[in-house]
Amino acid sequence: MVRTALIISVSSGIGTAMAHDWIRAGWTVFGTYRTASQDTEDLEKSGVRLVQCDLTDTASISSACDSLRQTCPKWDVLTLCPGTMDPIGPFASTDFDAWSQSLHINFTNQLRMVHALLPTRNLHTEHGPCVLFFAGGGTNNATTNYSAYTLSKVALIKMCELLDAELTDTRFTIVGPGWVDTKIHAETLKAKERAGDNLQRTQDTLAQGNFTPMEDVLTCCNWLIQQPREIISGRNFSVAYDGWGTDELRNALADNPDLYKLRRHGNTLSIPRPPTFSNKA
């Protein structure tokens, strides 16, 4: 079956690799880009249909969504690949406008595009249309100096669950790709001392080439979009650490609707609360 995919920010990294993979599989692929480059030229030559879109500009987003609705009346998969770690540095000394803009790029404006494109989803696919987001580092701890980026990714994780609860005809899922060899790490190298401990970690990873293989990212994403709603929707997956593709994980997900979701339940201590004194004379 020929599928139709929209890839937001298709012009680099995971988005580019995903587009080429799906084109080879016979898919129809549309994508957005911010700046023309050799990558966008290669994508067009391969058959990807491109629309210019600046995720910092709501007018540009609106125009791009209008174009996508006209040229792609029905989509099966919507993938959102934008991501920036900037501004890097302690929150208290970071320019707040830059911090706020990062949230728009990494979270708000991605949802703006989802909101605009949901009406053209194809509801007649086997498991329903699929919206795929990407999570990032720092969602499991307090990563210093990357607050805007980390907060955005945590918000996307919860938003997947909220959308899943509200739109039961569509699958919403999010995947953490791990350390993938993409240009986003240049932001950390450029930040230098503002990156804190993550600067050395990034330098070591780049020097050692200890990355999550792009092939694993693509294979995991392809597995996710083939699964029914009860297995993937509203959940946060990890390429590097989860047993995706196995019956064991699939059965566990089917049995536990809370698995791979943000929960306080199960992460508490059974200590009785103190007596209430509010009614005491």
Image (cartoon, rainbow, N blue to C red):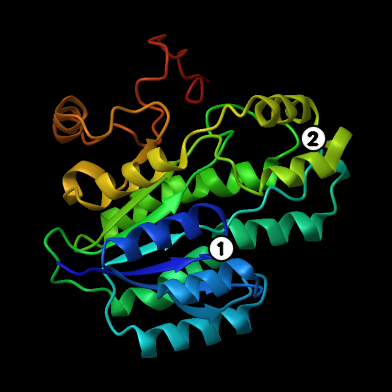
Circle 1 SS class: helix
Q: Please say whether residue 233 is visible from this viewpoint.
A: no
Could you tell me residue 46's position as x and y percent? 43, 71
Q: Residue at horizontal 48%, vertical 50%?
A: 156
Could you tell me residue 173's position as x and y percent? 34, 49
Estimate the spatial distance between the alpha carbons at disc 1 and disc 2, rounded to whole Å.
24 Å
Q: Residue at horizontal 53%, vertical 70%?
A: 42
Q: Which residue is mark 2?
A: 195
Could you tell me residue 26's position as x and y percent? 26, 67
Say whether residue 145 is left or right of residue 273: right
Whichever of callouts 1 and 2 sits on the residue coming sooner in the sequence is 1
Residue 243, by quadrant, is: top left
Q: Is residue 51 above or below residue 246?
A: below
Residue 79, by quadrant, is: bottom left
Q: Which residue is mark 1?
A: 108
- Count of numbered circles in the view: 2
